[in-house]
Amino acid sequence: FIVSDHLRRVKGNERHMVTEANKGVFRRFYEEAWNTGDLGIIDELLDTNFVNHELVDVVGSHREIYKRALTETREAFPDWETTIDDLIAEGNRVVARWHGEGTHTGEAWGIPPTGRRMSSTGITIVRVVRGRITDFWKKDDSATIWQQTEDAEQGPR
């Protein structure tokens, strides 16, 4: 009985350490990639077979597509800052509730700069295996960025 109780505690501690390490992987990924534009962190932390489940029937490397999206966003919003509001992990899954904001000073998806401060919120779930993100799911209100951009183009009403 004493041995099995000890083993249960050891396994619980190991799970806790892995869970905390997975949270660290996510935090580095979001904070270093989105807040600095460091594409190298994507190569380091996203698995070569990374799957972005937002992309349905998209051919090509999801990791490379993610890099392009990050680059385009940082070009449009060079001061973009993402803040992780909640970070929860269970096993190999990490869930984050976050918000981001930046100033639209570069062209965004064919829309000229507006100079306006814009924001977005969302929830992201990733699966981490051996220190690398293998799967990615996200729901956000990025459509509000489009709306904020359109409102800025039209001017005050």
Image: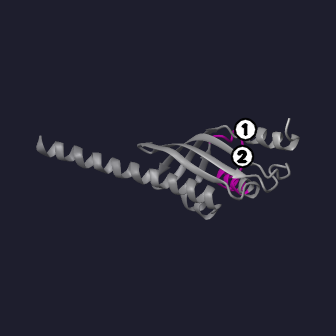
Looking at the rendered structure, the kind of residue marked 1 is Thr
Secondary structure beneath label 2: strand
Residue 119: x percent and y percent? Answer: 68, 44
- In which quadrant is the N terminus drawn? top left
Toward the viewer: 14 or 48? Answer: 14
Q: Quadrant of residue 32?
A: bottom right
Residue nearest the viewer, comparing 136 with 77: 77
Q: Is residue 29 left or right of residue 59?
A: left
Q: Is residue 33 above or below residue 152?
A: below
Q: Are marks 2 and 1 in contact (CB under 8 Å)?
A: yes
Instruction: Work out whether residue 40 can be spotted.
Output: yes
Task: Assess whether residue 54 is covered by the magenta stretch.
Answer: yes
Instruction: Residue 46: give x, y in percent of width and height.
Output: 57, 55
Residue 47, how many percent across, how many down? 56, 55
Left or right side of 32 for 113? right
As drawn, the residue found furthest toward the left would be 2
Q: Which residues are magenta?
A: 53-71
Screen quadrant of the C terminus: top right
The number of numbered badges drawn on the structure is: 2
Disc 1 marks which residue?
144
What amino acid is labelled 2 in the image? Met
Q: How is the image coloured?
A: one colour
Can you tell which mark lies on residue 118? 2
At x 85%, y 39%, the residue is 156
- Per the image, label 1 sits on a secondary structure element best described as helix
Identify which residue, 105 or 76, lies in the foreground: 105
Q: Sequence-wise, which precedes: disc 2 or disc 1?
A: 2
